[in-house]
Structure formats: structure tokens, C-alpha cells
Image (spheres, rainbow, N blue to C red):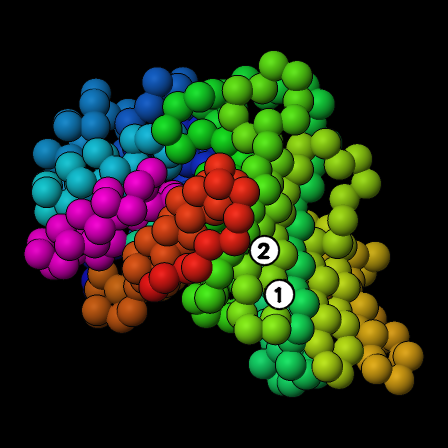
Amino acid sequence: MTAPISAGMIGFGLAGAVFHAQLIRAIPGLRLTHVCTSRTAEAQQAGLAVAESADTMLADPGIDLVVIASPNHTHFPLARAALMAGKHVVVDKPIAVTIEEADELIALARTRQRLLTVFHNRRWDGDFLTLRHLIDEGQLGEIMLYEAWWDRFRPTIKQGWRETATPGGGLLNDLGPHLIDQAISLFGWPEAISADIAAQRQGVCVDDYFALTLYYGEKRVRLGASTLVAHPRPRFAAHGMRGSFIKHGLDPQEAQLRAGMPPTADGFGVDAPEHYGTLHSADGQAVVIPTETGRWVTFYEAVRDAIRSGAPAPVDPADARAGLALIELARRSAREGRRLAADA
């Protein structure tokens, strides 16, 4: 019988405790044993051993895989140290804060012959899987306008590193990687980008609004998020030569994990019928499309298989690097107030 892959995790906040820990525990062949965190009581209550430090965890020969679920600005130094220690590495998005950091991690993983992948779990959202299926089947025809919005209503600034003026803070670095990764996976690298980025709430010190436009010939891809939208725009709106698909609401997996629902439970990842999207055809017909079941566990199943048998990583770190490059280009576009060519 093959021994399970032993994993240690650095960070036990929302990403670590709610997402990574529960998903890892749902995968046969993976075993989460240690966590490095200041939230000792919570980790112990979850049945995890608490490492004295990251260095202690990385020095443990019994740990094969290290999951980096800490604040964005720590991703690069921790992932680099883990690769240097000979560990396989999963990094929560974004892969790093700068392109140079991402390039160094990718090169180091190649040199050390270790898995490096990035937690772009939103590739396995049920609504995105549904949209991708409709596009692949040609039901929308050639897409001419694609919009993806991620709106919230949070007039009060939320305490935490995401809303502090540290490298990797701000809404674009938080939600942008997901929206950009989904767009690139559908349409590839754009020809150009323009961006509007703002800090709208009183007292906020990082961006809390962004709107990006990616240019693909005559096609337009519009991505954005805001913290001041009480009635959210459609999560997805894809308009093609044969019809449009409109979908409201967020994938349920995050809410289910927050509520303590195991990923193995019946109904996990299943969308509510009232949130199903609608396919509007060119002849005026409207058909409700049941949402495919979301499946974030696919990510860690692929991590297991990549470590055991050399199967492809669930997310190529080069894809995460590409998203980071577009974020950097978007910030430059916003500063300069103009469209910029997106040189590959």
C-alpha cells in the first residue's frame, strides 16, 4: 500500500483553515499533519500538530508537501525556502508579488525537480465550468463580449492584511488573479489592456475597486470588482454570435466550507436552482441552464497525482506568472491613463 503524502501548511487563517485544510483532508493519499500558525488553539482543535516555526517544519524529513496559505507578501520567501528544503509546494494565489519573484520560483522548482503549483481553485467553480462547457460546445458562437464581475458591499474597512498598505494588498491582488486566470484560460493572452483602479471608501489605503478591459481583436473582455455594490452585477455575462449566457451569484463551495460542510458530503458544490444561469438564444428563446457541480477537490487530487506519478500540475505556475504580469501591466495602465500593449 502506498504511504500517504504528508503535508504541512504555513498559515491557518481563512485560506488555510477553511479551504486548504478541508480540501486536503478530503483527498485519499494526502495527509495534513502540521501547521505553522499563531492560532495554536484552533490548529490543535483541528487535530493538527503546531510547528514551532516555518524553519522547523521545512527541516522535517517526514513532510513531503508544503502549502503556503499566508499573506501575499510572504508567498515568495516561504515558497523559496520550501523548495530549497526539497519540498513540493502549493502556493495560494497570487504566486508572488512581482514577476521577478515568480520567475525565480519557477526556475528553482525546475532545478530542484519539485512540484510548484498555485491555488487557482476558481477554475473548478461550477458556474465557470458551466460557462466553459457552453463555449466549448459552440452554443454561444464566437464570443464578442465577456464580462466577469465580483461585487461585494463592504462600506466598512475590514481589518486584516488584505486591506493594509503592504506589498500584495488591495482588491486587485486579492480577486484579480482569479478573474484574470479564468479569462486567460478561456481566451489566451490578450493583445492589450486598459485599467481603472481606485480606492473609493473613506480611509481605505489600498485599491477597493478595479475595472479591466482586455483586448482580443474585436473581442472585449471586461473584468472587475467593487466593495460598494449592494446589488451585484452578473457574475458572468458572455455574449456571442449565437446568444448570451447570464449567471448571477457566487459558486457555493466557499460558503459551504465556511459552514463546515465536508467536501465529500452529498450536495457539496451543488448550486441552488434559483441561481442557475440563463442561455438567451438569437431567436429570443431563454433556457435555464443547470449549473455544473463545482469541484475544488480536483485541484488537490491533481497535486497528489503530480507528486506520485509525475502527472501534470493542476495549475502550471507559468499561468499564475502570466496573471501576475497582467496585474502589473494593469497598474501601469491605470497610472498612465492609457491602453497598453500586452507584450507576451
Spot occupied by residue 214 in the image (x, y as percentages of width and height): 54, 60
Residue 330 in view here: yes
Marks 1 and 2 sit apart, C-alpha to C-alpha, by 7 Å
Going from the N terminus, do you reach mark 1 or mark 2 first?
Answer: 2
Label 2's element? strand
State the residue position of label 1.
220
In reply to whether residue 95 is colored magenta, the answer given is yes
Q: Residue 77, relative to residue 275: is it above or below? A: above
54 or 43, nearer to the observer? 54
Residue at left 53%, top 48%?
A: 338
Residue 112 got which mark?
none
150 sits left or right of 53 in the view? right
**Magenta span contains residue 207:** no
Residue found at the far top of this picture: 203
Residue 248 in the image: x percent, y percent?
76, 54
- Report the residue marked by disc 2: 213
Amino acid carrying label 1: it is Arg
User: Badge 2, how many Cα within 10 Å: few under 14, some, many 20+?
Assistant: many
Q: Quadrant of the N terminus?
A: bottom left
Nearer to us in this view, 255 or 176: 176
Above/below status of 53 relative to 322: above
Image coords of residue 3 (percent x, y): 21, 56
Say what secondary structure mark 1 lies in: strand
Whether residue 35 appears in this view of the structure is no
**The image quarter in which residue 132 lies:** bottom right
The kind of residue on which mark 2 rests is Thr
Position of the C terminus, as image quadrant, is bottom left
Q: Is residue 7 left or right of residue 284?
A: left
- Magenta range is 88-116
Q: Cβ–Cβ below 8 Å for labels 1 and 2?
A: yes
Residue at point 50% right, 31% down?
170
